[in-house]
Image: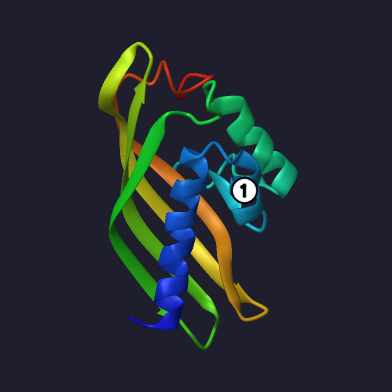
């Protein structure tokens, strides 16, 4: 594994850690230079830290402990890196588990991430994060707005 591979894998893991911790400010910092949204076609992508923060705050429920009561599991990570160009792509599967009052531990969502990365100032950062939803369970305790 190259240093670039590890840095990109750490960005992907950091996203899961921050969202599960209810740290939407940290999620917005992590994705501040990226276009973020759902679907394959690229329409409706949100850009800029304020817009990304608003996206998470308006869609994801947080409980009294400040978290959404979730665990994001990311697997099947495929990273392609162009060191010379300072760009990379990644594809992975994700599953969201949730356990909150009124909802026993269960998977509530599963899908795929399609990510693009760029190296700036010697460090890798997200350039785009698309989440594609493949399976939907009981999201009534998780989302503030229904899925499209």
| Residue 144: percent from left, percent from top | 53, 19
| Residue 148: percent from left, percent from top | 47, 24
Question: How many numbered dots are placed on residues in this image?
Answer: 1
Tag 1 residue:
26
Q: Hey, which residue is sitting farthest bottom in the picture?
A: 84
* Quarter containing the N terminus: bottom left
Q: Is residue 96 above or below residue 27?
A: above
Graded by Cα atoms within 10 Å as few (under 14), some (14 to 19) or many (20 or more), the crowding at tag 1 reads some
Q: Is residue 16 above or below residue 67?
A: below
| Residue 48: percent from left, percent from top | 71, 49
| Residue 18: percent from left, percent from top | 52, 46
Residue 49 lies left or right of residue 17; in this view the side is right
Q: Hey, which residue is sitting farthest front in the picture?
A: 65
Q: Secondary structure at mark 1?
A: helix
Q: Residue at x 74, y 42 (%)?
A: 50
Tell me if residue 38 can be seen.
no
Q: Residue at x 37, y 38 (%)?
A: 71
- Front residue of 71 and 94: 71
How are the colours assigned in the image?
Answer: rainbow
- Front residue of 40 and 115: 115
Quarter residue 122 falls in: bottom right
Quarter residue 80 falls in: bottom left
- Front residue of 120 and 67: 67
Q: Is residue 8 above or below residue 27?
A: below
Residue 72 lies left or right of residue 33; in this view the side is left
Q: Is residue 68 above or below residue 91?
A: above
Q: Residue at x 27, y 25 (%)?
A: 105
Q: Residue at x 39, y 50 (%)?
A: 113
Tell me if residue 84 can be seen.
yes
């Amino acid at each position: 594994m190259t240093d670039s591979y590890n840095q990109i894998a750490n960005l992907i893991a950091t996203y899961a850690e921050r969202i599960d911790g209810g740290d939407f400010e940290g999620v917005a910092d992590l994705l501040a230079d990226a276009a973020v949204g759902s679907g394959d076609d690229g329409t409706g992508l949100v850009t800029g830290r304020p817009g990304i923060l608003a996206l998470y705050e308006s869609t994801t429920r947080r409980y009294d402990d400040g978290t959404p009561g979730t665990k994001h599991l990311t697997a099947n990570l495929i990273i392609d890196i162009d060191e010379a160009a300072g760009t990379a792509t990644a594809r992975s599967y994700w599953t969201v588990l949730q356990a909150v009052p009124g909802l026993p531990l269960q998977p509530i969502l599963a899908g795929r991430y399609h990510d693009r990365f760029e190296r700036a100032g010697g460090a890798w950062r997200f350039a785009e994060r698309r989440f594609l939803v493949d399976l939907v369970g009981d999201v009534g305790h998780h989302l503030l707005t229904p899925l499209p």
